[in-house]
Image (spheres, rainbow, N blue to C red):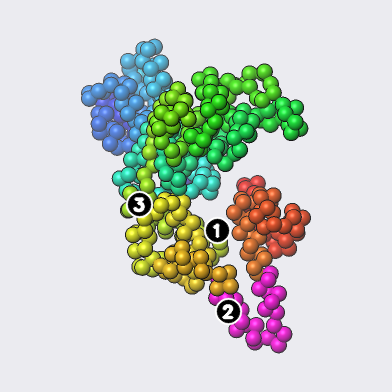
């Protein structure tokens, strides 16, 4: 069993010795320090509990508490002091102390509190680990170490914990939704839903109902009530992509909701509330839209509390190859291909290309190259859009089929035709099911077959659906 790592920050050597001796007998690993500076330096990621005195030679324990909570948010801090007062107790708990003990304290009580604190620490780490696994499966990671993208990472860190509206700007394909998701999943709302709405993809006359919902009979096609994205996102985050496309009349209704967090579905006078964080994104110049009268200035200032500008991929030169390798691994897994490597010429091509479509173009280019390239290497010609356009399905399958020919030729009655058809059908269905995360309705639309046919093929080929795997967990 892993030992509980404890740091004691107390200048009273006799207290520190008693605590250290008792906790070590209890199976803990204990470090004792007499000053704030030395104590904070001794805290590690594996430290579970800090016992902190309030009065220390180099400063206030309350200030140290704040610093520790900021640097190590998972670490549990227990205040131990001989200077207990009501106000200091209240202030310590407000700043995030786990518990507060006055000297002299009962050592058995301290051990019980530490055991409970360590269990809570382990549970928090476990939950955080599970969240990372879930989010890693759902969300493409933001990759990069260039100064431009590191600046964005820092901005995400600064705004994530503050429940404020964020405007994310940048050209198409730069990853604006990824930034919004990163802010959400690192915020206090991470347990709530992240709901993304692309306003440019919805007909203008349907956006109001899509956002605010409607009641049954609100209009002729309203056969049943619809909740709407705002209500669905209650407790979480609503991300409005392409906000510049919002109709000027609907902008007023959205503004009222952002001010009061109240709304009424279409066809109803009942006022509802929704506790959501709103983030918006656009690839347009909103200031220019305001000047031209296409976007309300009051709504612009509501959105633009904090603006995060996403850099162009061509301005993130150091990130191109790491991103390419990341998408390469994703594509190999998604399309069930063998492991592939980029040749030197392919890397050179990626680094010198202008990337008008930014990260999204890089992702699509790598995916196409993985599917259409032969063998275990991806060459420059596999990445070139002109070459890819000339690459036919026949070219793709010809290389794959060759491996069956030698084996089938040895048989008296070969079955190449049936074997290839079954292999191709199984692969196409697996890819479609995997791409839609087990959503069979979406898969049928992509494949152009009915649901019964898809269901029977999944059963015939024993294809596992992502949704089923999640349920088992």
Q: Residue 291: x percent and y percent?
A: 41, 28
**Left or right, 376 with reference to 62:** right
Q: Residue 3: x percent and y percent?
A: 42, 42
Q: Is residue 393 above or below residue 271?
A: below
- SS category of the residue bearing label 2: helix
Q: Residue at x 39, y 22 (%)?
A: 95
Q: Which residue is mark 2?
A: 402
Q: CA distance from mark 1 to mark 2?
A: 23 Å
Q: Residue 425: x percent and y percent?
A: 67, 65
Q: Residue at x 34, y 64 (%)?
A: 348
Q: Is residue 470 visible?
A: yes
Q: Residues within 10 Å of mark 3 (few under 14, many from 20)?
A: some
Q: Is residue 472 above or below residue 60?
A: below
What is the residue that sits farthest to the top in this orientation?
86
Please provide the residue range marked out in magenta: 396-422
Q: Residue at x 49, y 56 (%)?
A: 364
């Amino acid at each position: 069993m892993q030992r509980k790592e404890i740091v004691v920050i107390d200048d009273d050597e006799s207290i520190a010795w008693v605590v250290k001796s008792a906790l070590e007998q209890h199976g803990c690993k204990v470090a004792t320090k007499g000053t704030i500076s030395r104590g904070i330096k001794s805290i590690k990621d594996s430290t579970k509990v800090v016992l902190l005195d309030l009065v220390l030679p180099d400063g206030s324990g309350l200030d140290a508490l704040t610093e520790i909570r900021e640097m190590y948010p998972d670490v549990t801090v227990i205040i131990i002091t001989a200077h207990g007062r009501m106000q200091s107790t209240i202030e310590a708990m407000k700043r995030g102390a786990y518990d507060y003990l006055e000297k002299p304290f009962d050592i058995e009580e301290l051990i019980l509190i530490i055991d409970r604190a360590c269990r809570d620490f382990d549970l928090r780490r476990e939950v955080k680990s599970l969240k990372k696994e879930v989010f890693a499966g759902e969300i493409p990671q933001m990759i990069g170490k260039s100064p431009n993208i590191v600046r964005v990472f820092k901005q995400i860190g600064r705004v994530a914990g503050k429940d404020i509206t964020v405007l994310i700007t940048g050209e198409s394909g730069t990853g604006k939704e990824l930034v919004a998701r990163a802010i959400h999943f690192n915020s206090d709302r991470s347990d709530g839903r992240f709901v993304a709405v692309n306003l440019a993809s919805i007909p203008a006359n349907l956006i109001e109902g899509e956002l605010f919902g409607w009641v049954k009979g609100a209009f002729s096609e309203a056969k049943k009530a619809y909740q709407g994205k705002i209500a669905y996102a209650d407790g979480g985050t609503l991300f409005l992509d392409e906000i510049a496309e919002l109709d000027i009349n609907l902008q007023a209704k959205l503004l009222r909701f952002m001010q009061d967090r109240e709304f009424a579905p279409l066809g109803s006078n009942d006022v509802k509330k929704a506790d959501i964080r709103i983030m918006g994104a656009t690839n347009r110049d909103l200031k220019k839209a305001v000047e031209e009268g296409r976007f309300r200035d009051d709504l612009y200032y509501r959105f633009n509390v904090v603006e995060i500008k996403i850099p162009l991929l061509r301005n993130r030169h150091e990130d191109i190859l790491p991103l390419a390798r990341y998408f390469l691994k994703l594509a190999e897994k998604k399309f069930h291909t063998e492991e592939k490597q980029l040749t030197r010429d392919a890397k050179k091509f990626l680094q010198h290309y202008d990337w008008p479509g930014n990260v999204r173009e890089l992702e699509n280019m790598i995916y196409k190259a993985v599917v259409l390239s032969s063998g275990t290497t991806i060459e420059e010609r596999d990445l070139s859009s002109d070459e890819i356009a000339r690459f036919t399905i026949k070219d793709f399958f010809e290389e794959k089929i060759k491996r069956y020919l030698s084996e089938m030729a040895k048989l008296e009655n070969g079955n190449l035709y049936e074997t290839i058809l079954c292999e191709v059908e199984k692969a196409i269905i697996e890819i479609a099911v995997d791409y839609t995360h087990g959503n069979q309705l979406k898969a049928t639309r992509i494949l152009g077959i009915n649901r019964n046919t898809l269901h029977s093929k999944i059963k015939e080929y024993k294809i596992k659906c992502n949704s089923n795997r999640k349920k088992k967990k």
